[in-house]
């Protein structure tokens, strides 16, 4: 009897099968959760090594990311996905594959070229960038460390630009498996840096790298390489006809270049706020930069898990409906996505507020009051940023990048103003978090109002607002239960390990979520009805 052979191409082809929206959302949420868990272990190990023993060093590591990340966000990141995908899908919808692949090759080559030049410039000017813009408040030793680490991490925008274009192609045609794997593998690379490279690198008894926190920077680069490899594998079976050429006359390419500046500027303005916050935090006590970044990172996990995953899964369908002129279908799809995000993000934000001490304990043994305070101040941003990712995609599906840009300029201006005010008032890192929440609330409110007006009042109908009010009430019940549970199962001074904290945290979360579902069931929330009907099918199928 012959054993079945392993065929790499067939496995990849199976993984690249087009997924329906629900399956894509579940896949993206699951991969985001895995990536978040890896991120927790990453931060836990990093904090245990340096946060108490060398807080200035970990501040330097955090500051080193700002300019490379800024360049990536302003040139590529979400800016590319939301401008490239609608135009790319239009070409595919009309059967013009040749134009679609010319567009893809052109975008890939242009982005890689721009980012390569940018990476080289960052390496050259790392010293003044850190010294005068990013972290002028650091002492000389951590400042020198930040400069050297930035020069290492500077190659990442070039690598990320390649991975992002390839991932956007897969996302556009509804292939999400390898797109979903890439972020998790990025964290794997950083974990290798923490666990292996920080101890130094020896080859045949010759030490070529001394180790230390600089090893984490090497892990960051390794993670970016993993992302490129994963994105390349995801192209198998898609028929991508790459050419080392820029088709300047391709109308699709010109359309993307026309849309890209406004969205890139929008992304850049968003990240300017991050640079300003890092600058302000560097002037506070040692470790403030890291504490703010850690709170922001924890707040981003549910945003990515809910807001980014769901809006990314729905975006191709939204662009398709707009391309086909089905505006009523677009509104219905948008409302479905928005209600889903609201239904999931609101209780998560509420429970996060009451369980923030337990959450911080996962990334730092014994917890950290300052990080917990920052996370608590960011709970409004958790909800608003989750909705924000869908709200902007509503405009981008219509190839409108100017309105989100204008709104972003207003919101970021207010955000920076509040951040400076709270810093002067002596609020510390949590003041920066309050400013972030206020800015996020203002931005998402204006985005939804403008979009509702543009659609002649037909976007957010009465049914949506009834569902919204019921969700608020159910979330209030979940919050009351979460608060009560934290009193019954408080964090103790002896809870210094993951296994001490995790059972209490899960008990609080599960009880709160169960109360939320029960409240939603009696309030008649449609989303709960979907969950209960699925559970009934599973239970009765197993009984049968």
Image (cartoon, rainbow, N blue to C red):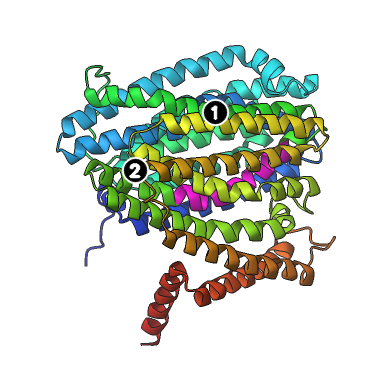
Name the residue carrying label 2.
Answer: 171
Q: Splitting the image into 4 quarters, where does residue 237 fall?
A: top left
Q: Where in the figure is residue 414, as x and y percent of width and height?
A: 64, 32
* 1 and 2 marks in contact (CB < 8 Å): no
Which comes sooner in the sequence, label 1 or label 2? 2
Where 73 sits versus 365, above or below?
Answer: above
Name the residue carrying label 1.
Answer: 409
Q: Residue at x 40, y 31 (%)?
A: 401
Q: Which residues are magenta?
A: 290-309
Q: From the viewer's perspective, tell me whether residue 30 is left or right of residue 97.
A: right
Observer-nearest of 286 and 222? 286
Q: Where in the figure is residue 424, as x and y percent of width and height?
A: 80, 30
- Find numbered disc 2 in the image and state the secondary structure of the residue it sits on: helix
Magenta region, mostly helix, strand or loop?
A: helix
Q: Where in the figure is residue 29, as x and y percent of width and height?
A: 46, 54
Circle 1 Cα neighbour tier, 10 Å, few/some/many (<14 / 14–19 / ≥20): some
Observer-nearest of 410 and 103? 410
Distance (Cα) linking label 1 and label 2: 28 Å
Farthest bottom residue in view = 544
Observer-nearest of 168 and 532? 532
Where 388 sits versus 201, above or below?
Answer: below
Q: Residue 291: within the magenta? A: yes
Specify whether residue 454 is in view: yes
Q: From the viewer's perspective, tell me whether residue 160 is left or right of residue 204.
A: left
- Find numbered disc 1 in the image and state the secondary structure of the residue it sits on: helix
Q: Where in the figure is residue 113, as x and y percent of width and height?
A: 40, 18
């Amino acid at each position: 009897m012959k054993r079945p052979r392993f065929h790499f191409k067939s496995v990849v082809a199976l993984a690249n099968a087009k997924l329906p929206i629900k399956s894509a959302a579940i896949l993206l949420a699951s991969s985001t959760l895995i990536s978040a868990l890896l991120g927790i272990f990453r931060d836990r190990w990093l904090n245990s090594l340096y946060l108490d023993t060398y807080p200035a060093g970990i501040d330097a590591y955090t500051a080193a990311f700002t300019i490379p990340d800024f360049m990536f966000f302003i040139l590529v990141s979400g800016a590319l996905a939301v401008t490239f995908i609608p135009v790319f899908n239009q070409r595919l919808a009309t059967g013009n594959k040749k134009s679609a692949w010319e567009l893809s090759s052109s975008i890939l080559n242009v982005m890689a070229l721009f980012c390569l030049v940018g990476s080289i410039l960052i390496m050259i000017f790392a010293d003044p960038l850190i010294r005068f813009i990013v972290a002028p408040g650091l002492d000389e030793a951590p400042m020198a460390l930040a400069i050297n680490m930035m020069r290492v991490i500077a190659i990442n925008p070039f690598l990320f630009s390649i991975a992002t274009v390839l991932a956007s192609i897969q996302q556009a045609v509804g292939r999400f498996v390898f797109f979903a794997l890439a972020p998790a593998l990025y964290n794997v690379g950083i974990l290798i840096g923490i666990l292996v490279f920080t101890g130094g690198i020896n080859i045949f008894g010759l030490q070529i790298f001394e180790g230390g926190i600089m090893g984490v920077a090497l892990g960051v680069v390794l993670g970016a390489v993993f992302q490129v490899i994963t994105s390349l594998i995801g192209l198998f079976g898609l028929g991508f006809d790459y050419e080392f050429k820029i088709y300047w006359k391709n109308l699709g390419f010109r359309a993307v270049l026309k849309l890209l500046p406004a969205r890139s500027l929008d992304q850049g303005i968003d990240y300017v706020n991050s640079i300003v916050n890092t600058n302000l935090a560097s002037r506070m006590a040692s470790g403030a930069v890291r504490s703010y970044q850690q709170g922001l990172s924890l707040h981003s996990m549910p945003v990515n898990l809910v807001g980014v995953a769901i809006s990314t899964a729905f975006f191709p369908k939204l662009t398709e409906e707009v391309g086909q002129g089905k505006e009523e279908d677009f509104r219905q799809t948008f409302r479905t996505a928005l209600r889903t995000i609201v239904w999931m993000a609101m209780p998560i934000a509420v429970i996060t507020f009451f369980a923030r001490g337990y959450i911080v304990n996962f990334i730092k043994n014994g917890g950290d009051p300052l990080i917990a305070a920052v996370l608590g101040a960011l709970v409004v941003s958790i909800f608003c940023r989750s909705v924000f990712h869908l709200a902007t995609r509503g405009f981008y599906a219509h190839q409108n990048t100017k309105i989100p840009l204008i709104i972003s300029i207003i919101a970021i201006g207010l955000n920076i103003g509040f951040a400076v005010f709270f810093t002067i008032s002596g609020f510390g890192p949590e003041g920066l978090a309050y400013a972030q929440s206020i800015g996020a609330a203002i931005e998402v409110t204006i985005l939804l109002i403008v979009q509702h007006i543009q659609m002649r009042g037909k976007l957010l109908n009465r049914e949506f607002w009834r569902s919204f009010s019921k969700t608020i009430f159910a979330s209030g019940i979940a919050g009351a239960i979460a608060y009560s549970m934290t009193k019954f199962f408080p964090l103790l001074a002896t809870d210094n390990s993951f296994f001490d904290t995790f059972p209490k945290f899960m008990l609080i979360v599960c009880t709160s979520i169960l109360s939320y579902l029960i409240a939603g069931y009696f309030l008649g929330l449609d989303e709960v009805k979907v969950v209960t009907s699925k559970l009934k099918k599973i239970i009765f199928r197993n009984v049968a």
